[in-house]
Amino acid sequence: MIFYILKRFLIAIPLLLAIAFLTFLFINLAPGNFFDQMRLNPQISEETVEKYIQLYQLDKPLIVQYFAWLKRLLHLDFGYSFTYNIPVTRVLGMRLINTLVLTIASFLFTWLIALPLGVIAAVKVDKFWDKFISFFCYCLLSLPTFFVAFLFLYFAYILGGLPLGGMVSANFSELSFFAKFFDLIRHLIIPTLVISLGSIASLTRIMRANLLEVLRSNYILALRARGISESRVMYIHAMRSAVNPLITIFGYQISGLLSGAALTEIICNWPGLGSLMLSAVRSQDLYLVMGTMLISSIMLITGNLIADILLAFSDPRIRIK
């Protein structure tokens, strides 16, 4: 098992390097750069621009720039954000926490809602609640994330009561501890729902299918024949077997929520890595783009790595591949 985990870590390293190089290549292939914009500012001298270029070796060939960035990265130096005029690590530190707050809230909401809905649909199979939940899931799966986000923002604007963007209110620093907590919850509601609804629909359908398959198995029939109560058969024996295949989905849900959070952050104006990456690309802030892409890639690969490890725990045959 240790060898398998080590192998997955070693595979992730060249993957991260490849993602970083492609990002570095594409941002440099784009016409213009951040320093062209700096030269248009009369308050910034040409000597200042040249100092930045020489300091980060941006006048050297592309491959030299890339390896110079990698060398600084070994010392946890992500470079300097020319837009914010502070090191990239400080910018990422602020935004990474915000993305994790949104991702964890969406992840918990997804699993706490999807599993009970899947169980209800399986218990009430072919009845009203099963058909209603199935119809609800099909509708959610057919709606694009950006459309759901705009829809929620529209109704929030019409009905009021929920903020239309941001993470906290303007007077957040003046609020008490509990008022700050509830203010954060209010701002979390729309982006959490937007990210979670599609995942809830897919996870509910998987849980329903797994539980129905288990309920039709021979050992469940044997348990019922022994006179064990239906509730014990359902919620102890059948549930345990039905949830087991979802272990492998657990890690992939993490990576899926992270990728879905980027678009939602931009639409809902949530100050996370997604909106930061968009502003960095638009301003061609080279090292900020590299930093956000690297952190996002690490989080996505970590989610898939967790899925692989959980799969190896649940199925020992995977470890020898």
Image (cartoon, rainbow, N blue to C red):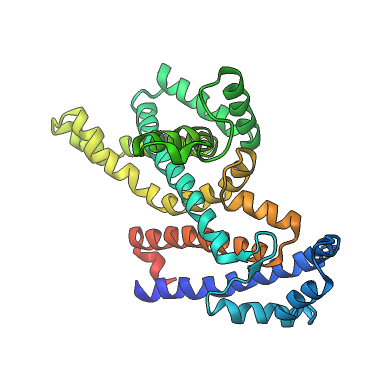
Image side of residue 219 versus residue 28, left or right = left
Image side of residue 87 versus residue 279, left or right = left
Looking at the image, which is closer to me, 87 or 157? 87
Name the outermost residue toward the front. Answer: 43
Query: Is residue 102 depicted above or below 233 in this figure?
Result: below
Query: Is residue 134 depicted above or below 128 in this figure?
Result: below
- The quadrant of the picture occupied by the C terminus is bottom left
Looking at the image, which is closer to me, 2 or 105? 105
Query: Is residue 267 depicted above or below 73 in this figure?
Result: above
Looking at the image, which is closer to me, 37 or 99? 37
- The quadrant of the picture occupied by the N terminus is bottom left
Name which residue lies at 25% across and 33% down: 234
Name which residue lies at 33% across and 26% down: 123
Name which residue lies at 53% across and 64% down: 298
Classify residue 251 by image quadrant.
bottom left
Name which residue lies at 52% across and 55% down: 94
- Residue 7: x percent and y percent? 45, 75
- Residue 253: x percent and y percent? 47, 49
Name the outermost residue toward the left. Answer: 227
Q: Is residue 164 visible?
A: yes
Figure label count: 0
Classify residue 36 by image quadrant.
bottom right
- Residue 252: x percent and y percent? 48, 52
Classify residue 50 by image quadrant.
bottom right
Image side of residue 230 versus residue 97, left or right = left
- Residue 122: x percent and y percent? 37, 29
Q: Is residue 203 visible?
A: no
